[in-house]
Amino acid sequence: MIERILTVGGFTLVSRLTGFLRDIMLAAILGAGPLADAFFVALRLPNHFRAIFAEGAFNAAFVPAYARIRTQHGPSAASLFGDRIFTLLIATQAALLALALVFTPQVIELLAPGFSREPQQFALAVSLTRITFPYLLLITLVTLWGGMLNALHRFAAAAAAPILLNLSMMAALALAALFGSRAAYAAAWGVLAAGVLEAALVGGDAARVGLFTSFRALRWDDDVRRFFKALVPATVGSAGTQLALFADTIIASFLSAGAISALYYADRIDQLPIGVIGIAVGTVLLPEMTNRIAAGDEAGAHSAQNRAIEFALLLAVPCVVAFLVVPDLIMRGLFMRGRFTAADAHAAAMTLVAYTIGLVPFVLIRSTVAPFLARGDTATPMTAALIGTAVNILCKVALMGPLAQVGLALATSIGAWINFVLVLFLAARADFVRSDAELKSSLGKLALAGLALAIALFLAAPAVAALFSSLPRLRNESELLALAVLGGLLYAALVLALFGRRWLASLRARDKKAVAPPTDALQGLHQ
């Protein structure tokens, strides 16, 4: 399982790195003012719906259902199920796209009501959204095909697809700069082109292994009925999470110019460990636990979850420390060039600190909800998510005045902790989680390593700044790189000192023993 996590995490890391290059270009060309705010609203709208109808709710319901059907009834039954869901997706997404294109002004007025004070900014957001919104239909198909591939333990294509979004947007921005076109429109067309490229990549991989879907007559059979029984609460839970993000955009549109951009850039940094670690671990863990539970191996499922949490925290701890100790340097080193000023960097840095308070639950939440989803229970995670969302929105209203966009990010972190603690409590009550001795020991050692790393970075940062103070150019970048190398080496040494050289090998050995699938139970996966 760890090898698969590294595969997904590796491609996700490349995606995040190319995403940073993309955001550096956006920051330099669009800055963090009204033009950037209009584009980010146009980018957020299809992404909100994608998170509700595609990657969030759909994956939670579809991947366990498809894996279970293929395991228990074979590839033919799974193919029939996939075709019927494909037909439903095409029909619903086409209808949603038509409505969105017709009512775009009303949607923007609802999502960013503060833009109505600036008619030109409002009109630009409407135009850009009409270009970006068809991306939703394409990425929904990518999610379907990616879920089918994941059930066969093929993760590479779906994990690599987001890289194409970054490359496409960068190419569009470069062409706009070369030919003097309007950069915001170029970036929007880059988003749409990326949807076509991603669909071609993942759909092509699905076709190569015989998983490509086709239209089928819709029938309300037991598999489809069970899928929708899981999909409805998963959609409600995802909608609740996205409602909180909608609230961010709505409230930030009334704040001073640049608030939406500060949220965006801070979230981009915060999403690095969430995507590379949390989502990668959850993506691999869900089909593993589904197959184990379907085969009656509860002990193996629990052990797989423990190893996943252990591995996720091993990689997440240095990110938490860095984001809390040197957030200003991170933002200056990555984005402070062109129209992105030191003041913009500081605003984004304070927002990053607030987001980081909730980074641990964000990284672990997919691993903690996996035992529910693997059993087809999406209602329990939905309940926890809605409670967390309610607390999140209430805190946003309370904190927006004194803390501006930092308060919005802090509210997000508070809601994440509420959601995470509730899921853990409900999972423990249902005996869906069982922490073993190895996990408990690792938690203490990783906390100690994180504390030591934080103290070291705090003490080293002024010395590194003085060392590079005479550089006329690339000073921030040099400081950030030096601290990253220093911190990485120190953390590696701390892990070796606390765990011993054989710990990672032992972790991998226990992981393989826990999740090696019984041949007879999963025979259908390899036919």
Image (cartoon, helix red, strand yellow):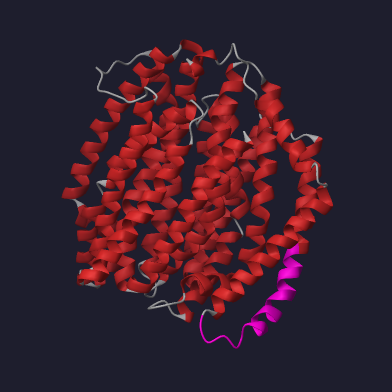
Looking at the image, residue 66 sits to the left or right of residue 465; the answer is left
Residue at horizontal 40 percent and vertical 48 percent from the top: 162
Was residue 484 drawn as part of the magenta stretch in this picture?
no
243 above or below 142? below
Residue at horizontal 81 percent and vertical 43 percent from the top: 441
Image quarter of residue 503: top right
Residue at horizontal 33 percent and vertical 68 percent from the top: 36
The location of residue 242, given as percent across then percent down, is: 42, 49
383 above or below 361? above
The location of residue 209, given as percent across then percent down, is: 40, 24
Looking at the image, residue 269 sits to the left or right of residue 510; the answer is left
63 above or below 396? above
Residue at horizontal 68 percent and vertical 29 percent from the top: 512
- The residue closer to the viewer here, 423 or 64, is 64
* Count of numbered circles on the image: 0
Q: Magenta segment range?
A: 453-473
95 above or below 218? below
Image quarter of residue 189: bottom left
Quarter placement of the N terminus: top right
The location of residue 361, given as percent across then percent down, is: 61, 49
Res. 32 in view: no
The location of residue 308, given as percent across then percent down, is: 65, 38
- The residue closer to the viewer here, 244 or 67, is 67
Res. 8 in view: yes
